[in-house]
Image (cartoon, grey):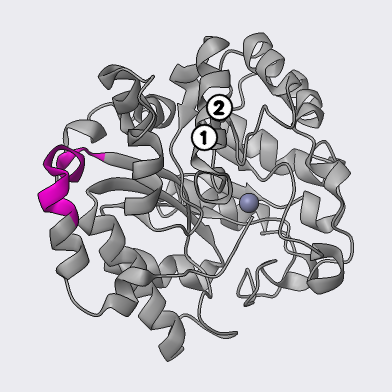
Amino acid sequence: MQQRKMGYWYLAGTGLLWWLSLVGSPVWANQPVIDMHFHAWPYGADGPPDHPENIAVMNEMIDGLKNHNVVLATASGPQAFLERWSREAPERLLLGPVLPCEGGMNPNWYQYRCYENGAEFPDLAWLRAQYENGTYQVMGEIYTQYAGMSYADPRMDPYYELAQELGIPVAFHTHSAPPLTASRCCPNFRISFGDPMQLEEVMVKYPRLKVQIMHANPLVYPMLLDLMAQYPKVYVELSPFQRLLRREKFHRLLRAFKEAGVLSRVMFGTDGDDHGDAIEAYRSADFLSARELEGLLCKNAARFLRRRDACEASH
Ligand SMILES: [Zn+2]
């Protein structure tokens, strides 16, 4: 899902709120965090990454990573945005393409072409080169749902094959999207194509694929917990429910994973939310042990990404 960045940080105009948050929560401020749902794309205006409004939001978002000790963030977006944003924070961002892009554009409020050649799907040889030369490290957000395709659509096979061969994690958009998405941006968008159970076909066909289910919500899709039990390598990420749901209901969501015994495969993500607000949604869950919280905010993702030393880092 996407939404406009609210950005009270930026609007505050001073470091006062940040300073106050440090005074109130010194441990929280130092806790390393990995954000498994971050976007480098046009948040401010239609147009390229150097549009002044897009530059302003980029700076705000990257400051947010630094101020909350987000040591790694998996960032997806149009090719030109990934290139531009990674120049600002090369050590923090792991880059991944968005695909498919119906009409060649990212399916967000503001748009820009996903690939320099205007294609809906990245050229396979070009994409392989991006992974092999270290430019990209992850794949997705996968937007089959926005294009009215199932996850198992044969047009996706070459990309899954590539990701499985190279050990690249693949992150799938699931569940739903902001209201009236089909009439607002993406005429082929259907809720039915976001059912996470439909990922089972992909998992069976590509048993070594590293799958991340984005927007995972067992309160709506209880079978998700069976899927995680059946496929022990599947990890999930919970944005934007830390922002959309009442706090008590978000904690019920966390508790569902805990009671099912799969909390160690749940990862933190923001999808554009303020990092301080998002972290607090987890920290306020008093039924979590310190070790579980550390796993949710950093170590589970570090394991998934095979970057086990990432949570030791502090910038
Ligand atoms: Zn999404």
Question: Callout 1 environment at 10 Å: few (<14), some (14 to 19), or many (20+)?
Answer: few
Q: Name the residue that disc number 2 marks.
A: 252
* Residue 143 in the image, given as x and y percentages of width and height: 71, 52
- At 47% from the left edge and 65% from the top edge, which residue is drawn? 40
Q: Are marks 1 and 2 in contact (CB under 8 Å)?
A: yes
Instruction: Please name the residue that numbered disc 1 is placed on.
Output: 248
Q: Which residues are the magenta region? A: 21-32
Kindly report the secondary structure that dominates the magenta region of the rendered protein: helix
In this view, the mark in front (1 or 2): 1
At x 51%, y 54%, the residue is 271
Whether residue 174 can be seen here: yes
In the rendering, at what x and y percent does residue 1 appear? 64, 55
Above or below: residue 86 compared with residue 203: below
Say which residue appears at 32% left-offset and 75% top-offset: 10
**Label 2 packing within 10 angstroms: few (<14), some (14-19), many (20+):** some
Mark 1 to mark 2 CA distance (whole Å): 6 Å
In the image, which disc is placed on residue 182? none
| Amino acid of disc 1 | Glu
Q: Where is residue 151 in the image (x, y as percent from the top left)?
A: 79, 39
Residue 247, image x and y in percent? Answer: 49, 40
- Secondary structure at badge 2 equals helix
The three-letter amino acid code for the residue at tag 2 is: Arg
